[in-house]
Amino acid sequence: MSAAVKPMITLEEICAEAEKIRLSNPNLGDKIVSDIYHNAEMIAGPAVSKNSTDSRSWDHKLDDILTSRLFGYPIMFALLSIIFWITIAGANVPSQMIADTLFAFQDQLLIWFELAGAPSWLTGIVVLGMFRGLAWVIAVMLPPMAIFFPLFTLLEDLGYLPRVAFNLDNMFKKCRACGKQILTMCMGFGCNAAGVVSCRIIDSPRERLIAVLTNNFVPCNGRFPTLIAIATIFMGGMVVSELQTAVASLVVTSLVVLGIFITFAVSWALSHTLLKGEASSMVLELPPYRKPQLGAIFYRSLIDRTIFVLKRAIIMAAPAGAITWLLANIYIGEISIIGHLAAWLQPFAYAIGLDGFILLAFILGLPANEIVMPILLMCYLSTGQMMEFGTLEELRDILINNNWTWLTAVCTMLFCLLHWPCTTTLLSAYKETGSKKWTFLTFLIPTIIAFTVCFLVAQSARLLNLV
Amino acid sequence: MNTALTTIPLSTLGIGSVCQIVSLNLQGLLRRRILDLGMVPGTPVQCIRKSPTGDPVAYMVRDTLIALRSEDASQIHVNPM
């Protein structure tokens, strides 16, 4: 070993030496990357032969349509509507079948409990609370999820989603946000908690925070069934039966578009106030379209997503059902605890077009949005009218018997779309941002917007005597 | 070098035209990203399509379609071919 070169022993010394070399050559990184590519070219050049540009020309033709000035946006809207239409139209029959089976089993359970001589409170908690909550969640959520998720995964697999980001990036740039935010929103359709985690794909910390704070404005899978059920019952119910599904899917699509519009508005507002800053750069790869792999789609969408979300819903729904049953069946004076709480909430709730029970259901549904409807129905059913539910007509009767008008339906859908995120999403936001302040804002911003929008809608409708 | 006379920003390239990258006037993370995608000096780039609003624009680099915002593309100097 020559005396001129001192042997280096520690990692620190090596790092210092590397830093010295790096600083003495300002463009060292560039040179290394250039050399790597140059070497790769030399190897690949003689060894790799390319096929004719057939597949590429297909890609170009598809891109010409899907990202064109004329058709780009209408196609996005149409695809979204078609997915909802297929989901709503296809979910009806299986939902009904599952409901019939599970509620038949509930009757059987009641008989068994009676034969076993179980006390009525135990029957209430287990069968009327836990089992009924579970049955509702499975009957209402499973079929739409099992249709919606594979369709959405199909679009993902085809390579369409990056094109959506390509089409919409300019709007995000105007809000000083990142175009990739739309991809995190697409994840949010499945689950907002997953959407919040996916915000990691955004490079700029400021734009990532904007994406985290606004992710809740795309309705997640836990809220879709609520939106779809109410839209089908009230909005679809206004037209002849042949058009019901179409009208309902149009209503849900419009709600999603409204949610996206509010995402833009809030992103813009954040970029100009709390998260001031200029739009940073965006590099987006548009991969070639691929033939979808059906096996992978079914596996990913059914096992990874549907079962995952359903499992979470079931874990939440069973205890929530038991607690709700208890609250509805423990009486203080003449009225159950739920009755007291709802009565106390009634003035606020009425001001924003809901009723005390609906607001209470949203509050009790904080752990998971999936259980808002079951809780609400349990509240309504425990107040007198004992009804078997399961079909949409029966649901409609329950709601109308509890004084629902079209305004209640509209405000409930708006509140469902805009209100606070579930605890899982909040927890993910806390993990991603590492800050209590931003987590609190993730809760506060949607809450304020939901109350404001519903208040304005309810008050204007009443002022104009529309109800 | 005669390249300095004829270089233009990548953002001014018309659809369908081909060019060669001369220099990157970018810093930090974006510079790294662009280099990692193989957009090193000398690389041929073809402008493929604009998004419906005209920005971002998609470029073909080494058989990969990459979309860049006009602000970023204007910092990449190219030689039209």
Image (cartoon, rainbow, N blue to C red):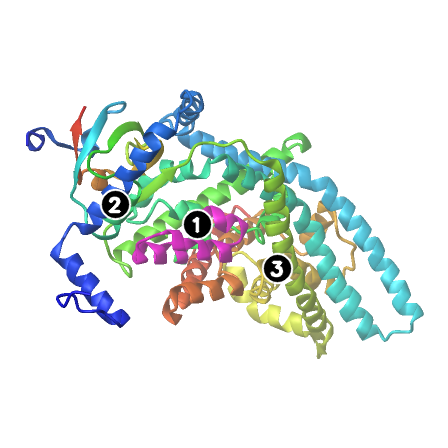
Spatial CA span between label 2 and label 1: 30 Å
Residue extending farthest to the front is A1
Q: Quadrant of residue B39?
A: top left
Amino acid type at image mark 2 = Val
Type of secondary structure dominating the magenta stretch: helix
Q: Which residue is mark 1?
A: A184
Which chain is indicated by disc 3?
Answer: A
Which quadrant is home to the N terminus of chain B?
top left
Which badge, 2 or 1, comes first in the chain's sequence? 2
SS category of the residue bearing label 2 = helix
Looking at the rendered structure, which numbered label has been put on residue A372? Answer: 3
User: Which residue does the image show at 16% across and 44% down from the upper left?
Assistant: B25
State which mark lies toward you, 2 or 1.
2
The percent coordinates of residue A438 (x first, y second) are 37, 66
The percent coordinates of residue A168 (x first, y second) are 36, 39
The percent coordinates of residue A137 (x first, y second) are 68, 55
Q: Is residue A228 magenta?
A: no
User: Which residue does the image show at 37% across and 30% down from the upper left?
Assistant: A47
The reply, left or right, for residue B43 in relation to residue A77 is left
Give a yes or no on whether discs 2 and 3 share a subunit. Answer: yes
| In the image, residue B22 above or below residue A406 | above
Spatial CA span between label 3 and label 1: 24 Å
Which quadrant is home to the C terminus of chain B?
top left
SS category of the residue bearing label 3 = helix
User: Which residue does the image show at 19% across and 37% down from the upper left?
Assistant: B41
Which badge, 3 or 1, comes first in the chain's sequence? 1
* Magenta-drawn segment: A185-212
| In the image, residue A330 above or below residue A112 | below
Q: Residues within 10 Å of mark 3 (few under 14, many from 20)?
A: many
Amino acid type at image mark 1 = Thr
Spatial CA span between label 2 and label 3: 54 Å
